[in-house]
């Protein structure tokens, strides 16, 4: 197969800020789409520079004032030849500018227009502000994350933003784009981050279907109910992850720990027996440092692993051998560790181009629209671009 990025020839207009939208469009850019990051001429995307560098690579940068008549007209010109537009404003904001889906679809019927919002375009909370924690809280997901009802957990992996926003929007965009390529008819993709994170809460939803209600935090199969699935502290304050859910893995774990008496208590429904077994396993792990347990379980078929810090993880052969982690220098934001696209396929190899600074490619993109130097200077003087 001749090397060719799968989204070569697809143009995406990215009006999003912060995290869910920019990371969604970065996935598209990594797969070969020409993504134009469009920012206003004021604050623009006010995310910290280090995060900007992480979620905007392989894009081009343009600054437009969409409150300016000439700025809006430039966007309409871009839409005429675009395949996808992604925006993350509160519902109604684009309509007030005359840039909603129906207005832009009249210019380009095959346009896929994705709106990413906290609660969806037509919900009772459509205009309410929110962040990841709010979306997780209102969807019931936050209730399921934590060791017990008294200590809900805060995660540095924004579950709603990434699962409900980034990945849900990405799936919707690519499905609508595929159909538009066949039929010539685009679609409005209404992505509610809260809907998206709820839709992926499959384990607690399964428990609710089975038992009529969700278990308390820390009491379900994957959240602490079973001794065979959990974290255990070592003597040096580190942790080992034991995930021996299947019987064969559990038996091998018991064999390596030289504890044949544990074997019969794999997935017991007896809470008291589970508590005793958990304490016994904890005592064993607490008797030796992480290095001891790493050596014991290395290359063993029982699903037991050390819990690494992120600093340790990015240095491991697991990621380095696949070029999944690499260092890159940004001309403004400095040198950082980056993670390559996880979307791998034959005939395509990931390449990295640094995230654009605000408006870095404004002149080039306007030139593609037929604007000469005098026209660009006039647009800049009017405040339509910068």
Image (cartoon, grey):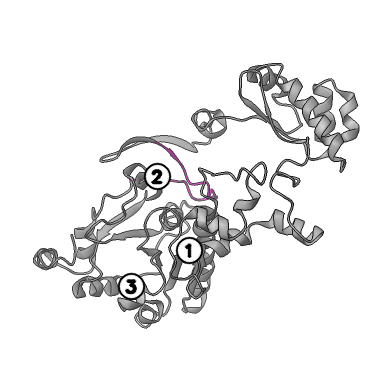
Answer left or right for 100 relative to 203.
Answer: left
Which one is in front in this view, the residue at disc 3 or the one at disc 2?
2
For the record, the magenta segment spans: 337-354
Quadrant assignment, res 63? bottom left
Q: Is residue 323 above or below residue 13?
A: above
SS class of the residue under badge 2? helix
Which residue does the image show at 32% across and 44% down from the upper left? 49
**Residue occupied by mark 1:** 118
The x and y percentages for residue 317 are 55, 29
SS class of the residue under badge 1? loop
Question: Residue 54, which numbered label?
Answer: 2
Asked if labels 1 and 3 touch by Cβ distance under 8 angstroms, the answer is no
Q: Is residue 16 within the magenta segment?
A: no
Q: Is residue 176 above or below residue 230?
A: below
The x and y percentages for residue 106 are 37, 83
Ranked by sequence position, the earlier of labels 3 and 1 is: 3
Q: Which quadrant would the C terminus be assigned to in this image? A: bottom left
How far separated are the C-alphas under marks 1 and 2?
Answer: 22 Å
The x and y percentages for residue 234 are 66, 22
SS class of the residue under badge 3? helix
Which one is in front in this view, the residue at disc 3 or the one at disc 1?
1
Quadrant assignment, res 28? bottom left
Picture mark count: 3
Which residue does the image show at 60% across and 46% down from the upper left? 152
Which residue does the image show at 20% across and 75% down from the upper left? 69
Kindly tell me whether residue 267 is visible in this rendering: no
Question: Residue 79, which numbered label?
Answer: 3
Which one is in front in this view, the residue at disc 1 or the one at disc 2?
1
Answer left or right for 369 relative to 273.
Answer: left
Q: Main secondary structure of the magenta part?
A: loop
Ranked by sequence position, the earlier of labels 1 and 2 is: 2
Answer left or right for 383 relative to 4.
Answer: left
């Amino acid at each position: 197969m001749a090397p060719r990025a799968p989204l070569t020839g697809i143009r995406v207009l990215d009006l999003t800020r912060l995290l869910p939208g920019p990371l969604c469009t970065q996935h598209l850019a990594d797969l070969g789409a020409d993504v134009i990051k469009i920012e206003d001429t004021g604050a623009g995307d006010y995310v910290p520079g280090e995060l900007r560098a992480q979620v905007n690579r392989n894009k081009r940068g343009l600054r437009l004032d969409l409150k300016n008549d000439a700025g809006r007209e430039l966007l309409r010109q871009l839409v005429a030849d675009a395949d996808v537009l992604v925006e993350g404003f509160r519902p109604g904001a684009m309509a007030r500018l005359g840039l909603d889906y129906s207005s832009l679809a009249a210019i380009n019927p095959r346009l896929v227009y994705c709106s990413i919002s906290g609660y969806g375009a037509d919900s009772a909370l459509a205009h309410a502000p929110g962040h990841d924690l709010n979306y997780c809280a209102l969807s019931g997901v936050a209730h399921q994350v934590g060791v017990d009802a008294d200590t809900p957990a805060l995660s540095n992996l924004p579950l709603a933003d990434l699962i409900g926003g980034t990945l849900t929007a990405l799936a919707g965009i690519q499905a609508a784009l595929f159909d538009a390529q066949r039929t010539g008819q685009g679609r409005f993709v209404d992505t509610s981050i809260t809907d998206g994170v709820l839709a992926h809460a499959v384990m607690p939803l399964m428990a609710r279907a089975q038992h009529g209600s969700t278990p308390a935090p820390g009491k379900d199969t994957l959240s602490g109910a079973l001794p065979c699935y959990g974290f255990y502290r070592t003597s040096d304050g580190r942790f080992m992850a034991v995930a021996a859910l299947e019987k064969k893995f559990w038996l091998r774990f018991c064999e390596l720990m030289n504890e044949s008496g544990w074997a019969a208590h794999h997935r017991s429904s007896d809470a008291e027996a589970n508590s005793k077994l958990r304490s016994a396993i904890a005592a064993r792990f607490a008797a030796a440092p992480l290095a001891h347990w790493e050596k014991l379980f290395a290359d063993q078929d029982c699903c037991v692993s050390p819990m690494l810090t992120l600093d340790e993880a990015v240095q491991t052969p697991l990621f380095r051998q696949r070029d999944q982690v690499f260092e890159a220098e940004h001309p403004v934001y400095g040198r950082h560790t980056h993670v390559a696209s996880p979307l791998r396929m034959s005939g395509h190899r990931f390449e990295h181009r640094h995230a654009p600074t605000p408006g870095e490619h404004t002149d080039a993109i306007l030139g593609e629209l037929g604007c000469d130097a005098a026209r660009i200077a006039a647009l800049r003087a009017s405040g339509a671009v910068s």
